[in-house]
Amino acid sequence: MPNSNANGQRKAMLLTGASRGIGHATVKRFSAAGWRVITCSRHPFPENCPWEMGPEDHIQLDLADPANTTEAIEEVKNRLEGGRLDALVNNAAISPKGEGGSRLGTLETSVADWQKVFQVNFFAPVMLARGLMNELKAAKGSVVNVTSIAGSRVHPFAGAAYATSKAALAALTREMAADFGPHEIRVNAISPGEIDTAILSPGTDKIVAQIPLRRLGTPEEVAKAIYFLCTDQSSYVHGAEIHINGGQHV
Protein backbone atom coordinates (compact mmCIF):
# COMPACT_ATOMS: atom_id res chain seq x y z
CA MET A 1 0.00 0.00 0.00
CA PRO A 2 1.57 3.30 -1.09
CA ASN A 3 0.10 5.19 1.88
CA SER A 4 1.23 2.76 4.53
CA ASN A 5 4.43 3.03 6.53
CA ALA A 6 7.20 0.46 6.78
CA ASN A 7 5.20 -1.52 9.34
CA GLY A 8 2.17 -1.78 7.07
CA GLN A 9 0.17 0.73 9.11
CA ARG A 10 -1.82 3.47 7.46
CA LYS A 11 0.10 6.75 7.36
CA ALA A 12 -1.08 9.27 9.93
CA MET A 13 -1.11 13.05 9.94
CA LEU A 14 -2.04 15.67 12.52
CA LEU A 15 -3.66 18.83 11.17
CA THR A 16 -4.54 21.93 13.16
CA GLY A 17 -7.28 24.31 12.06
CA ALA A 18 -9.17 21.63 10.19
CA SER A 19 -12.74 22.85 10.26
CA ARG A 20 -12.81 25.18 7.25
CA GLY A 21 -11.01 26.54 4.19
CA ILE A 22 -7.50 25.24 3.57
CA GLY A 23 -7.69 22.87 6.54
CA HIS A 24 -10.92 21.30 5.31
CA ALA A 25 -9.51 20.83 1.80
CA THR A 26 -6.34 19.29 3.28
CA VAL A 27 -8.39 16.76 5.25
CA LYS A 28 -10.19 15.71 2.09
CA ARG A 29 -6.96 15.44 0.06
CA PHE A 30 -5.14 13.23 2.56
CA SER A 31 -8.21 11.19 3.45
CA ALA A 32 -8.85 10.46 -0.24
CA ALA A 33 -5.28 9.19 -0.49
CA GLY A 34 -5.88 6.72 2.33
CA TRP A 35 -4.17 8.55 5.20
CA ARG A 36 -5.47 8.55 8.74
CA VAL A 37 -6.19 12.19 9.56
CA ILE A 38 -6.18 13.38 13.17
CA THR A 39 -7.61 16.87 13.35
CA CYS A 40 -7.73 19.48 16.05
CA SER A 41 -9.45 22.84 16.21
CA ARG A 42 -11.36 25.07 18.60
CA HIS A 43 -14.64 23.72 17.25
CA PRO A 44 -16.22 20.31 17.87
CA PHE A 45 -16.25 17.89 14.96
CA PRO A 46 -18.59 19.29 12.28
CA GLU A 47 -21.19 16.74 11.25
CA ASN A 48 -21.02 17.69 7.56
CA CYS A 49 -17.32 16.84 7.21
CA PRO A 50 -16.71 13.91 4.90
CA TRP A 51 -13.75 11.98 6.23
CA GLU A 52 -13.89 8.50 7.68
CA MET A 53 -13.24 8.24 11.43
CA GLY A 54 -13.67 12.00 11.70
CA PRO A 55 -15.45 12.15 15.06
CA GLU A 56 -13.11 9.58 16.62
CA ASP A 57 -9.99 11.33 15.30
CA HIS A 58 -10.94 14.91 16.13
CA ILE A 59 -9.55 16.66 19.19
CA GLN A 60 -11.19 19.85 20.40
CA LEU A 61 -8.27 22.06 21.37
CA ASP A 62 -7.71 25.71 22.19
CA LEU A 63 -4.23 26.43 20.84
CA ALA A 64 -4.33 29.79 22.65
CA ASP A 65 -4.04 27.82 25.90
CA PRO A 66 -0.52 26.37 26.41
CA ALA A 67 -1.72 23.91 29.05
CA ASN A 68 -4.51 22.65 26.77
CA THR A 69 -1.98 22.29 23.94
CA THR A 70 0.30 20.17 26.16
CA GLU A 71 -2.67 17.96 27.09
CA ALA A 72 -3.56 17.54 23.42
CA ILE A 73 -0.03 16.41 22.59
CA GLU A 74 -0.40 13.57 25.08
CA GLU A 75 -3.80 12.71 23.61
CA VAL A 76 -2.30 12.54 20.11
CA LYS A 77 0.48 10.25 21.34
CA ASN A 78 -2.10 7.92 22.87
CA ARG A 79 -4.00 7.70 19.60
CA LEU A 80 -1.05 6.97 17.32
CA GLU A 81 -0.52 3.37 16.30
CA GLY A 82 3.05 2.25 16.82
CA GLY A 83 4.07 5.70 18.04
CA ARG A 84 4.53 7.05 14.51
CA LEU A 85 3.41 10.36 13.01
CA ASP A 86 4.07 10.80 9.29
CA ALA A 87 3.04 14.44 9.00
CA LEU A 88 2.30 17.47 11.17
CA VAL A 89 0.59 20.37 9.41
CA ASN A 90 0.45 23.58 11.42
CA ASN A 91 -2.43 25.35 9.69
CA ALA A 92 -4.41 26.96 12.53
CA ALA A 93 -4.12 30.75 12.78
CA ILE A 94 -6.07 33.72 14.10
CA SER A 95 -6.19 37.36 13.01
CA PRO A 96 -8.26 39.63 15.24
CA LYS A 97 -10.13 42.52 13.65
CA GLY A 98 -11.24 45.95 14.85
CA GLU A 99 -14.72 47.44 14.69
CA GLY A 100 -16.53 46.59 11.49
CA GLY A 101 -13.79 44.12 10.55
CA SER A 102 -11.13 46.82 10.29
CA ARG A 103 -7.42 46.00 10.14
CA LEU A 104 -5.55 46.20 13.46
CA GLY A 105 -2.12 47.77 13.01
CA THR A 106 0.72 47.95 15.50
CA LEU A 107 -0.84 50.95 17.26
CA GLU A 108 -4.34 49.48 17.63
CA THR A 109 -3.52 45.89 18.63
CA SER A 110 -3.75 45.26 22.37
CA VAL A 111 -0.92 43.47 24.14
CA ALA A 112 -3.35 40.67 25.00
CA ASP A 113 -4.19 40.23 21.30
CA TRP A 114 -0.50 40.23 20.34
CA GLN A 115 0.14 37.48 22.88
CA LYS A 116 -2.86 35.39 21.85
CA VAL A 117 -2.03 35.63 18.15
CA PHE A 118 1.58 34.57 18.72
CA GLN A 119 0.50 31.72 21.01
CA VAL A 120 -1.77 30.26 18.33
CA ASN A 121 0.19 31.14 15.19
CA PHE A 122 3.76 30.69 16.42
CA PHE A 123 4.23 29.05 19.82
CA ALA A 124 1.67 26.26 19.27
CA PRO A 125 3.55 25.00 16.16
CA VAL A 126 6.78 24.96 18.20
CA MET A 127 5.10 23.07 21.03
CA LEU A 128 3.48 20.51 18.74
CA ALA A 129 6.62 19.80 16.73
CA ARG A 130 8.81 19.47 19.82
CA GLY A 131 6.20 17.48 21.73
CA LEU A 132 5.74 15.00 18.87
CA MET A 133 9.41 14.86 17.90
CA ASN A 134 9.86 11.17 18.73
CA GLU A 135 6.75 10.18 16.79
CA LEU A 136 7.87 12.19 13.75
CA LYS A 137 11.36 10.72 14.03
CA ALA A 138 10.01 7.16 14.13
CA ALA A 139 8.17 7.77 10.85
CA LYS A 140 10.87 9.94 9.21
CA GLY A 141 7.97 12.35 8.96
CA SER A 142 7.34 15.79 7.58
CA VAL A 143 6.32 19.09 9.17
CA VAL A 144 4.54 21.74 7.11
CA ASN A 145 4.04 25.22 8.55
CA VAL A 146 1.40 27.39 6.86
CA THR A 147 2.78 30.92 6.63
CA SER A 148 1.33 33.76 4.51
CA ILE A 149 2.18 36.33 1.90
CA ALA A 150 1.36 38.82 4.68
CA GLY A 151 4.53 37.67 6.44
CA SER A 152 6.71 39.43 3.88
CA ARG A 153 4.80 42.65 3.15
CA VAL A 154 2.22 44.95 4.68
CA HIS A 155 -1.16 43.57 3.67
CA PRO A 156 -4.31 45.71 3.38
CA PHE A 157 -6.42 43.29 5.44
CA ALA A 158 -4.15 41.07 7.54
CA GLY A 159 -3.38 42.68 10.90
CA ALA A 160 0.08 43.49 12.25
CA ALA A 161 0.06 40.70 14.83
CA TYR A 162 -0.96 38.09 12.24
CA ALA A 163 1.61 39.30 9.72
CA THR A 164 4.52 39.37 12.16
CA SER A 165 3.58 35.96 13.56
CA LYS A 166 3.69 34.53 10.04
CA ALA A 167 7.09 36.13 9.41
CA ALA A 168 8.29 34.52 12.64
CA LEU A 169 6.86 31.16 11.53
CA ALA A 170 8.81 31.40 8.27
CA ALA A 171 12.01 32.00 10.27
CA LEU A 172 11.07 29.14 12.59
CA THR A 173 10.75 26.85 9.56
CA ARG A 174 14.41 27.52 8.71
CA GLU A 175 15.50 26.94 12.29
CA MET A 176 13.48 23.74 12.56
CA ALA A 177 14.89 22.49 9.26
CA ALA A 178 18.40 22.85 10.68
CA ASP A 179 17.47 21.16 13.95
CA PHE A 180 15.10 18.43 12.77
CA GLY A 181 16.95 17.49 9.57
CA PRO A 182 19.62 15.38 11.29
CA HIS A 183 16.75 13.32 12.74
CA GLU A 184 15.42 12.66 9.20
CA ILE A 185 12.39 14.90 9.73
CA ARG A 186 11.74 17.29 6.85
CA VAL A 187 10.39 20.76 7.66
CA ASN A 188 8.95 23.12 5.05
CA ALA A 189 6.44 25.93 4.76
CA ILE A 190 3.79 26.97 2.30
CA SER A 191 2.92 30.63 1.91
CA PRO A 192 -0.57 31.14 0.49
CA GLY A 193 -1.67 34.40 -1.08
CA GLU A 194 -5.32 35.28 -1.75
CA ILE A 195 -7.22 32.01 -1.38
CA ASP A 196 -10.97 31.76 -1.99
CA THR A 197 -12.22 30.97 1.52
CA ALA A 198 -14.90 32.28 3.86
CA ILE A 199 -12.49 34.76 5.47
CA LEU A 200 -11.90 36.93 2.40
CA SER A 201 -12.31 40.64 3.04
CA PRO A 202 -14.28 43.14 0.93
CA GLY A 203 -11.95 44.73 -1.58
CA THR A 204 -10.13 41.52 -2.44
CA ASP A 205 -11.08 42.08 -6.09
CA LYS A 206 -8.67 45.03 -6.19
CA ILE A 207 -5.82 42.75 -5.09
CA VAL A 208 -6.80 40.11 -7.66
CA ALA A 209 -6.42 42.70 -10.41
CA GLN A 210 -2.71 42.95 -9.48
CA ILE A 211 -2.05 39.19 -9.39
CA PRO A 212 -0.36 37.92 -12.59
CA LEU A 213 -2.75 34.94 -12.86
CA ARG A 214 -5.70 37.33 -12.32
CA ARG A 215 -7.62 35.00 -10.02
CA LEU A 216 -7.90 33.74 -6.48
CA GLY A 217 -6.35 30.45 -5.50
CA THR A 218 -8.51 27.58 -4.26
CA PRO A 219 -8.13 25.70 -0.97
CA GLU A 220 -7.66 22.54 -3.04
CA GLU A 221 -4.61 24.04 -4.77
CA VAL A 222 -3.05 24.72 -1.38
CA ALA A 223 -3.93 21.24 -0.13
CA LYS A 224 -2.16 19.67 -3.11
CA ALA A 225 1.04 21.53 -2.22
CA ILE A 226 0.79 20.39 1.40
CA TYR A 227 0.32 16.81 0.21
CA PHE A 228 3.39 17.11 -2.04
CA LEU A 229 5.51 18.22 0.93
CA CYS A 230 4.34 15.26 3.03
CA THR A 231 5.11 12.56 0.48
CA ASP A 232 8.19 11.03 -1.14
CA GLN A 233 7.73 13.26 -4.18
CA SER A 234 9.43 15.99 -2.13
CA SER A 235 11.98 13.75 -0.41
CA TYR A 236 14.87 16.25 -0.84
CA VAL A 237 12.84 19.43 -0.28
CA HIS A 238 13.80 20.77 3.15
CA GLY A 239 13.75 24.22 4.71
CA ALA A 240 11.75 25.65 1.78
CA GLU A 241 8.87 28.09 1.72
CA ILE A 242 6.67 27.49 -1.32
CA HIS A 243 4.67 30.50 -2.57
CA ILE A 244 1.12 29.64 -3.62
CA ASN A 245 -0.16 33.00 -4.78
CA GLY A 246 -0.52 33.12 -8.58
CA GLY A 247 2.64 35.23 -8.84
CA GLN A 248 1.49 37.88 -6.35
CA HIS A 249 4.94 37.92 -4.74
CA VAL A 250 6.88 38.75 -7.92
Image: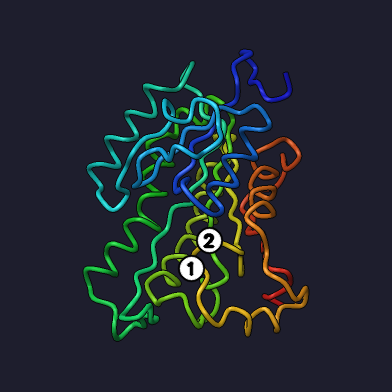
Left or right, 230 with reference to 40: right
- The image position of residue 208, as x and y in percent, is 67, 78
Which residue in the protein does label 2 denote?
Answer: 147
Three-letter amino acid code of the residue under disc 2:
Thr
Q: Is residue 158 above or below residue 182?
A: below
Q: Quadrant of residue 134?
A: top left
Q: Is residue 120 above or below residue 226?
A: below
Determine contact: label 1, label 2, CB under 8 Å.
yes
Q: Quadrant of residue 60?
A: top left
Reading the chain from its start, which is encountered first: label 1 or label 2?
A: 2
Q: Badge 2 local density, few (<14 within 10 Å), some, or many (20+)? A: many
Between 199 and 239, the one lying in front of the other is: 199
Numbered disc 1: secondary structure: helix
Left or right, 121 with reference to 29: left
Three-letter amino acid code of the residue under disc 1:
Ala
From the image, state whether disc 1 or disc 2 is nearer to you.
2
Q: Residue at x 46, y 75 (%)?
A: 158
Numbered disc 2: secondary structure: loop
Q: Residue at x 53, y 61 (%)?
A: 147
Left or right, 108 with reference to 5: left
Left or right, 35 with reference to 65: right
Which residue in the protein does label 1 denote?
Answer: 167
